[in-house]
Amino acid sequence: MKLLCLTLSLVMVCYANSQSRIENGFAMNPDYESYTNWIDTSYANCMQNWTTNMEWGSCIEEHHKHWSDFMNKEYIELMNLLDEDGKNRLIASQEAWRNNNKAQDDFWAYFGVVKPHFFGREGTFRSYMIDLQKTRSRAIELHTYKKAFSYK
């Protein structure tokens, strides 16, 4: 019984960590639908059609840029909806998000110097995919906040 409870707890933790906090909150609303847009469709198509490592890397880089641009657009639009307190909190939140990613990137770079052949190119490209997913998650989080603050 303990093993079953532990297993179910781990499954719930993994599920909860796969979405941002705001998505999890909105997911409890019966009207909520998980967010996808043209970038998701384009990325899925690109990931099905690359044949060389250069194409794989280009696919990740291109779509990471799209999500970064979308995130920045949502950030600016959200800022326009907030009062001063909200703006200050959003600025702090975005800075914390960027600083956390930079710290992780710095450690990844350090790891690459100390253990240069540990992951190989596939591991390196997968780490780039993780960066893309983190940016996507933040972009959707900002989009969802913007949607909530725009709701009348």
Image: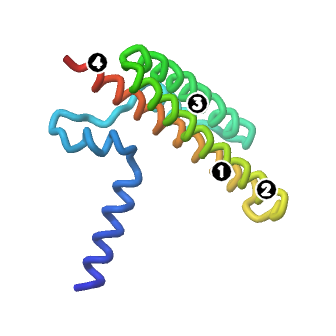
Whether 11 is drawn above or below 61: the answer is below
Sequence-first disc among 2 and 4: 2
Quarter holding the C terminus is top left
- Residue at horizontal 48%, vertical 23%? 75
Q: In the rendered structure, which amino acid carries the disc numbered 3?
A: His
Q: Quadrant of residue 23?
A: top left
List x then y, in percent, for residue 59: 63, 34
Q: In the rendered structure, which amino acid carries the disc numbered 2?
A: Tyr
Sequence-first disc among 2 and 1: 1
Circles 4 and 1 in contact, beta carbons < 8 Å:
no
Q: Which residue lies under the disc numbered 2?
A: 110
Q: Which residue lies under the disc numbered 1?
A: 104
Q: Which residue lies under the disc numbered 4?
A: 150
* Viewer-side label of 3, 4: 4
Q: Residues within 10 Å of mark 1 (few under 14, many from 20)?
A: few
Tell me the distance, in whole angstroms, between the alpha carbons under discs 4 and 1: 33 Å
Q: In the rendered structure, which amino acid carries the disc numbered 4?
A: Ser
Nearer the observer, 28 or 37: 28
User: Does 109 sit left or right of 70 as displayed?
Assistant: right
Q: Residues within 10 Å of mark 4 (few under 14, many from 20)?
A: few
Sequence-first disc among 4 and 1: 1
List x then y, in percent, for residue 106: 73, 49
User: Does 38 sit left or right of 62 as displayed?
Assistant: left
Nearer the observer, 148 or 52: 148
Quarter holding the N terminus is bottom left
- Residue at horizontal 33%, vertical 65%? 11
Mark 1: which secondary structure?
A: helix
- Residue at horizontal 28%, vertical 26%? 148
Q: Quadrant of residue 37?
A: top left
Mark 3: which secondary structure?
A: helix
Q: Mark number for residue 63?
A: 3
